[in-house]
């Protein structure tokens, strides 16, 4: 079932999902602040999906989001 989203059922996964969303918004905001959205590099591959920002977030998921949740 592609495209169907289910919210996390337990508090740990819900918190991880929330921190990933915050990190994604931070990265996207940095891209928009630099006005790089018109560049071919940041063009979404899928409609409405900021693919490059998602790729950048992957590099920071463990050192930022996962570590924050585990320490919290």
Image (cartoon, grey):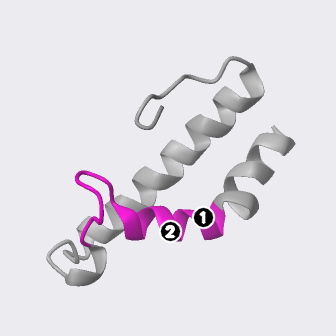
Q: Position of residue 62 (x, y in %)?
A: 74, 59
- Disc number for residue 58: 1
Return the residue nearer the eye: 51 or 64.
51
* SS at badge 1: helix
Q: Position of residue 45 (x, y in %)?
A: 30, 66
Marks 1 and 2 sit apart, C-alpha to C-alpha, by 5 Å
Return the residue nearer the eye: 66 or 4.
4
Q: Is residue 26 left or right of residue 33?
A: right
Q: Position of residue 59 (x, y in %)?
A: 63, 70
- Disc number for residue 68: none
Q: Quadrant of the C terminus?
A: top right
Residue 60: name its quadrant.
Answer: bottom right
Residue 58: name its quadrant.
Answer: bottom right
Local packing at callout 2 (Cα closer than 10 Å; few below 14, some 14-19, many 20+) is: few
Q: Is residue 51 left or right of residue 38?
A: right
Q: Is residue 27 left or right of residue 15?
A: left
Proximity of marks 1 and 2: CB atoms separated by less than 8 Å: yes
Q: Position of residue 2 (x, y in %)?
A: 44, 37
Membership of 45 in magenta stretch: yes
Local packing at callout 1 (Cα closer than 10 Å; few below 14, some 14-19, many 20+) is: few
List the residue tagged with mark 2.
Answer: 55
Q: Residue at x 25, y 66 (%)?
A: 32
What are the residue bounds of the magenta stretch?
Answer: 43-60
Q: Residue furthest left?
A: 38
């Amino acid at each position: 079932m592609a495209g169907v989203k289910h919210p996390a059922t337990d508090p740990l996964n819900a918190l991880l999902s929330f921190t990933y969303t915050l990190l994604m918004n931070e990265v996207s905001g940095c891209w928009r602040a630099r006005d790089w959205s018109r560049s071919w590099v940041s063009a979404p591959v899928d409609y409405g999906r900021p693919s490059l920002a998602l790729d950048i977030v992957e590099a920071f998921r463990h050192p930022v989001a996962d570590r924050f949740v585990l320490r919290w």
